[in-house]
Amino acid sequence: MKTEDGEIISKCLNGDSTAFGLLVDKYKESIYALAYSRLRNFHDAEDVTQEVFISAFRRLKTLRRWDSFLGWLYSITSNLCKMQKRSQSRRPDREFLEDQESQDIDWINSHREKELHESLHEALDSLPDIYQQVLTLYYLGGMNIAEIARFLGISPGTIKERLSRARVQLKKEMLTMMGQVFEQQRLKAGFTFRIVEIVKRIRLNPISPKTLPWGISLATGVIIAVLSIGTHLSPINTTDAMSGSPLPSESKVLKVGEIPVDVIKVSNISVISNQQWKGTGSGYVLPNLQNALFMSPQVGDTWTKKADMPTGRFQLSASAVNGKIYVIGGCSNEGGFLSTVEEYDPVKNEWTEKNNIPTTREGLSTCVVDGKIYAIGGFRNDAGIEFSIVEEYDPVKDKWTKKANMPTERAYFSARAVNGKIYAIGGWRVGQAISVVEEYDPAMDKWTKKTDMSATRYGFSAEAVNGKIYVIGGCPIGMNANQVFGNGGVLSTVEEYDPMLGKWTKRADMPIVRMFLTTSVVNGKIYAIGGYNIDDGNISTVEEYDPMRDTWTKKTDMPTARCWMSSGAVSGKIYVIGGCNDNSILSTMEEYDTGFAGESVNFKGKLPTTWGDVRTVMKR
């Protein structure tokens, strides 16, 4: 049986439920490791892993893109872990159970093992979440750097860096112990067969052979593409092509999981052999094959008009939570300061009014930790000074809660979250720019002074990527009658802040100087959008910053030039909301497609290279 995800899913949906065991075998270790990194309990992690696969099988027909199966499992796992935590926190016997967990005779058989587990938990708890996750996936999930990168949707360089930093913080003896404990706690033999026996009793309606699903296997898609290119190509026997018989390759049975499978060994990109194709030395491919066949339709770097926000405003703040965007506060057409909160659903393209924020304000900053939105600081004329007020919003309960005030009152600043902590950076206070950085711990409801920003400024935008914060643009000097928006002192400066080291580092300048811009992050890239400068006024420029390469790339301009707007990113798309343009206060919503959701297909990643000892080596 071929092990491409789409082929297996097709068999499952057409009545062969035992084929699902191949997917379980292929991904169980990764899902188990992810669950453990969230729950810190091997028994609970195994239970959640089982539930993930059973849930995935029940909902298999709802998966629209078969090649995104692993990402889908990741989402299911995250949700089930959250439910597990909530369930445990509500149990009246929780403290008793926690005391008993370390004595669970199912997986601790000696006092030495108990000590090892306690040491492991202490070691992991001493690290930031991002480091805990990669260590667990590496040592418990048995995944290499490239596999972890694909699993988390992060670059291999970032994963390598996180592993390196995590190892530096742990002693060599602790790493050895970690490997030993994780090896002992691998999923036991029979896990896959247990899942298969359960799913055999779950009835799925077969898919119609007349329906071509979005998740059609890549090999089939290639064949269809080739047949549709033109008549100059020789006819291809699709049955033979799918079975692999025309390929000059060998087949063998690999017994690497609980279920042995037949694997076709092929080159990285050769799937179909045809004498009219151009030879490359590693197989036969069409000229420019990657551009012609193995690329999804070229999408992205495009703008689309969406439903206007009900309340036109500027100096607002927006944050995305659970696939929806929440717009908070701001200033209206009439010059009135707002407490309005509105929720945008990108799928339905609809707006919904939510409970107002208790403190009316504009020039605030919001960010998200553990599904809660923290609205911080801001300004209101009738208050006479900038705010230090912090209020927490729970989108699920539509409820606001007062939290500890920020030590330094400010507006027109930026707050971003890293490893569960919020960093309030720079801004405007009593007629001048400031460089103050303060850290907020939501779990402790406590603020701590941190290293000041190197370049004093306000009206900038900041984003967190891979555990670091990037501060972009802004203005360094006061604003008065002779210094309109800094009188040409607007910056293109970019600085990187490392919260772990408390260190600021100068990075490559943004090409276009600006302030009162908005930024969003998609796939580890920062998109700087719109803003204001003296020479151009309100601008529509969009530039993409790659923190890994420290480079900027020009993108398609936003249709509506504006400043003092906000934005949120959902599913690879950025939604730019409100703002002002010349003398107009806007309710305009425009969607920018970064192209991430429709990236080029990485064909090698569609083969079972992450499972067992499969190799993509052509034998000719």
Image (cartoon, rainbow, N blue to C red):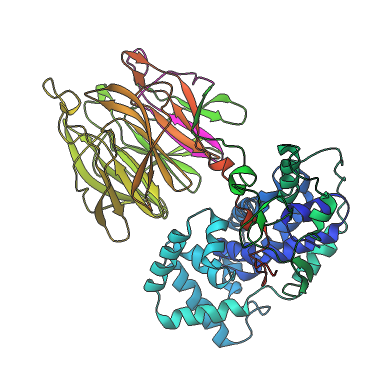
> In the image, residue 412 lies at what x, y percent?
28, 33
Q: Can residue 46 be seen? A: yes
- Residue 31 or 117: which is nearer the viewer? 31
Q: Residue at x 74, y 56 (%)?
A: 273
Q: What is the magenta segment's predominant secondary structure?
A: loop
> In the image, residue 386 lies at what x, y percent?
24, 32
**Rendered position, 429 above or below 46:** above
Q: Residue at x 30, y 43 (%)?
A: 471
Horizontal relation, residue 428 to residue 564: left or right: left
Q: Quadrant of residue 599?
A: top right
> In the image, residue 197 lies at what x, y percent?
85, 64
Q: Can residue 216 be seen? A: no
Q: Residue at x 60, y 87 (%)?
A: 110
- Residue 3 or 71: which is nearer the viewer? 3
Quadrant of the image containing the C terminus: bottom right
**Rendered position, 473 above or below 250:** above
> In the image, residue 242 lies at what x, y percent?
80, 54
Horizontal relation, residue 28 to residue 10: left or right: left
Q: Residue at x 66, y 60 (%)?
A: 283
Give the magenta range.
307-336
